[in-house]
Amino acid sequence: SVSLPVSYARRTENWSFLVEGAVSRSFARSARGDSNRGSATGYRVGGVVERRLNKHWVLGGAIDYRRSKDYSPSHFMLYLRYAFEPWQGPLPMRPEPMIPYAEFK
């Protein structure tokens, strides 16, 4: 397999975002040496953005879109994060979206 990932992150006082993408190509063949061979191409695009609303609240959103021959999950998320202690420092350079604890089909 070969993959070419690219990402770009930036932040300001109240904003933080990340944009990512990748293109991949994989090749496979059977260990038995017969004619079972295959190849596939896939790609992924995604991003995360966060906006500080005040000293306690941050609003964020994320999207992840992946495609290949037999694998094509996509995710979209909108979240609101609360900090118990007032905080005015810079937002993280690479936003960290909430991690879902379950997936429903």
Image (spheres, rainbow, N blue to C red):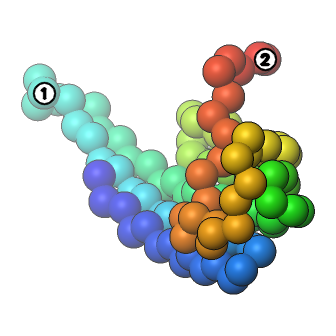
Q: In the rendered image, is residue 24 in sight?
A: yes
Residue 12 lies left or right of residue 94; in this view the side is right
Residue at 28% x, 32% y: name it: 36
Q: CA distance from mark 1 to mark 2?
A: 35 Å
Give x and y (percent) for residue 93.
Answer: 55, 70
Residue at 77% x, 17% y: name it: 104
Quarter of the C terminus within the rendering:
top right
Residue 80 lies left or right of residue 46; in this view the side is right
Above or below 87: residue 85: above
Which labelled disc corresponds to residue 31? 1
Above or below 32: residue 54: below
Tag 1: amino acid: Ala
Secondary structure beneath dot 2 equals loop
Q: Mark 2 — residue?
A: 105
Q: In the rendered image, is residue 45 in sight?
A: no
Above or below 54: residue 40: above
Residue at 43% x, 59% y: name it: 24
Which residue is most to the front? 85
